[in-house]
Amino acid sequence: MTWGAEQQSQGNEGEYGYGYGYGHSSGYDGGYGHGLAYGHGYDGGYAYDPGPGLPYDRTPPYEQPMAYEQPAPYEEQWQDVPEPEDPVLTETATTTAMAMETTAEAAGAEAAATGPASTSVPSPSPSHKKRAGGGRDRYFDALRAVALVRVVTYHTFGWAWAGLVFPSMGVMFALAGTLMAKSLERPALTVVRSRIRRLLPPFWFWGFFVVVAMLIHGWMPGWQMVFWVVPVGDPPGNRWGVQAWEILWYLRTYLWFVLLSPLLLNVFRRAPIPVLLLSLVPIVVFQYAWQPPDDRFGSALTDLATYLFCWLLGFAHREGALRRLKPAVVVLASAAALAYGGWYALAHRAEYGTYDLDDIPLAQAFWSAGFVTALMYFKAYYDVDFAWMARFRRLDRTVTVFNGRAVTIYLWHEIALILAVPLIDQFWKVPAFEKWLPLESQWFMFAVGWVLIWIAIPLFGWVEDVAARKRPRLLP
């Protein structure tokens, strides 16, 4: 799916009130559009203006040309989460660890009996202990949590500069690529099947509510309904539910990367660095030589080309290719990619109507490449793990919940933000709330949205446990 620009406005209506407006367009030549208009106060309820158009049959709401745009307001994140431990492998690892422990104890007893001249078994290094224990890497967990927060923040405020500060999409694809490369140490078919199994049940559960709501509001689905079963293409919908289902472009892109990963990893291992650099060629070709068609196929191609480098960068981290590079080379390459991506976004803002990276695929690809390369190389070169986070229990617990319920947060956060507006509308009917609460502030809507997200986590998050074949829990 591709994205256009987003505009938000707010202001007072009448003597007391709050107005919130939202507009969005998408598509290679203008795309579909929708708008929300809410009025709050004594003289208003709230009104919904669905706006014109639907995907692949649309009229441009904006004057400026839109060249195969990248998803902006609804970008980030279905997240990849680590695979559950294989019971057989876990049992084997446990047995091996017990045997090593027994050997070490025996060696220690022998050393005590024979004196200093005997040979003792060396203790494993800290990094080995961490890997053997199967502990999570808190550096990656922290990046994923920050990415999710940035997603919700962007979808609340629509700040064009948010992608420059932290390109959540690129970060999330890189983390998913790392996890996928790790999982592919097992048979490829098993891994792909497991990833699909973990993806589809939460999607089906969430989609049931969205599809039923759209049917109630007059949607007449066609054969494209199949994409609500297996989202290899953008699932269809009507204008009433567009703000909810637009986020599924990321899920579709992730699914294609999973399906292609066995082949991509095999190609990557033949020439890691050349393949990594060449992964930026497709998006350059799409920009200057050949424009993909304005349909589901073209949208998928553009998204895959935009984030292919980040996915392969995850491979490079897992395979150790990043660690072998010299710092000076990485710093120069990262800076060059950032400079080109930033320059292209700012120099072509008139063409796209914004400098938002999510509207400009070429800028997004290069900025994400430079930014994520720096993050991943820092991890590989210095072997940071953010173990200090364990000293801050609330922070550590929050990061754990974010990672254990990443799919739930991503799928339900837009619905939470949608529901926050009519909920705040009801607050205006209470004089005390009107007087003491900042009902007209988007920050207040942001806070209410997070409250609803935290309610959704225990209500719906257990589906992720079921998909992973774990015991369902309210919180991870």
Image: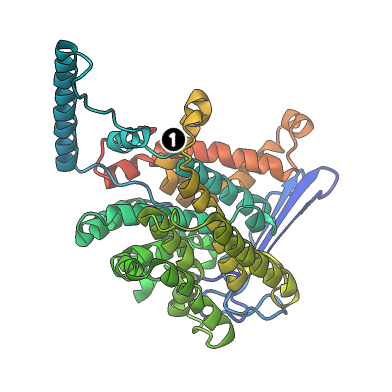
* Residue designated by label 1: 400
Q: Residue furthest front?
A: 117
Total labels drawn: 1
Query: In the image shown, does 410 or 142 lie closer to the viewer?
Result: 142
User: Residue 472 placed where, x, y %?
Assistant: 29, 36
User: Residue 250 placed where, x, y %?
Assistant: 46, 61
Query: Seen in the image, is 353 located left or right of residue 464?
Result: right
Query: In the image shown, does 296 or 395 lie closer to the viewer?
Result: 395
- Using the image, determine if residue 200 lies above or below residue 419: below
Quarter-wise, where is residue 346 in the image? bottom right
Could you tell me which residue is drawn at 74 percent across and 73 percent down? 347
Could you tell me which residue is drawn at 71 percent across and 32 percent down? 430
Could you tell me which residue is drawn at 43 percent across and 41 percent down? 403
Query: In the image shown, does 267 or 76 lie closer to the viewer?
Result: 267
* Mark 1 residue type: Thr
Can the viewer see residue 326 in this picture?
yes
